[in-house]
Amino acid sequence: MDKYLIVGLGNPGDEYAKTRHNTGYMILDAFARASNIVFEDKRYGYVAETSLKGRKVFLLKPTTYMNLSGNAVRYWLNKENIDQQRLLVISDDVALPLGAFRLKAKGSNGGHNGLGHIQQLIGQDYPRLRVGIGNDFQQGRQIDWVLGEFDEEDLKTLQPTIDLAVDIIKSFVLAGIDITMNQYNKLGKK
């Protein structure tokens, strides 16, 4: 059976739950709700499992904190013997407007600490979905911005992207990265 690892980056704990940096967690939570599955606290992360048309899908929300996300990703890839091309990492991105997104087959970490740590441990040859959180902060205030909470208006703007990301995950598993990029990237421009 083909296996896939879908990783939503974020930080564990209630104090981070609604922060911009936890956009990846929010998307995996939405996927889990739509699939009627529940996360369990396992090694290096909260993990949920489901299957899509005969393919096994592992959802991972790392509990290593953002800057050590690579530890969780590498562990679960190895534990379940999953090919890197069947890994999809979902992260927030200050370089994209709120609610915009970009799906890529590989690439740089774009200054994102979570992606940076993953890259240190497994390289940059893995698919990722970057979701825009905007960059309405003064120079030197990026940490406050990413660890700040979305307000109600932001969440309304973001919700359609979260819903679309659930479809993107399914498409990635069923159709692959190239078809999924072709189908969805045009919808991600804001």
Image (spheres, rainbow, N blue to C red):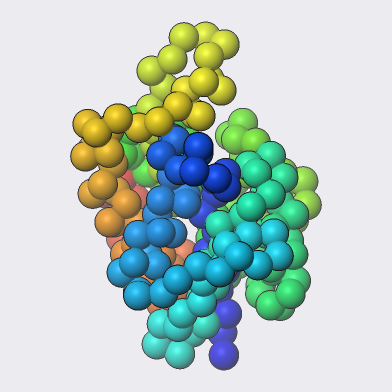
Q: Residue at x 61, y 31 (%)?
A: 111
Across and down, in percent, residue 95 comes to: 45, 29
Across and down, in percent, residue 80 comes to: 69, 77
In the image: residue 73, left or right of residue 134: right
Q: Residue at x 50, y 39 (%)?
A: 16
When asked about the image quadrant of residue 183, the answer is bottom left
| Front-most of residues 111 and 36 | 36
In the image: residue 64, left or right of residue 156: right
Across and down, in percent, residue 35 comes to: 35, 74
The total of numbered circles placed on residues is 0
When asked about the image quadrant of residue 148, the answer is top left
Extreme-front residue of the structure: 14
| Front-most of residues 188 and 77 | 77
| Front-most of residues 69 and 43 | 43
When asked about the image quadrant of residue 42, the answer is bottom right
Looking at the figure, which quarter contains the C terminus? top left
Vertical comparison of 56 with 25: above or below = below
Specify whether residue 16 is in view: yes
Looking at the figure, which quarter contains the N terminus? bottom right
Q: Residue at x 46, y 64 (%)?
A: 177
Vertical comparison of 52 with 101: above or below = below
Vertical comparison of 137 with 134: above or below = above
Specify whether residue 104 is in view: no
| Front-most of residues 141 and 180 | 141
In the image: residue 22, left or right of residue 72: left
Across and down, in percent, residue 164 comes to: 29, 56
Extreme-top residue of the structure: 139
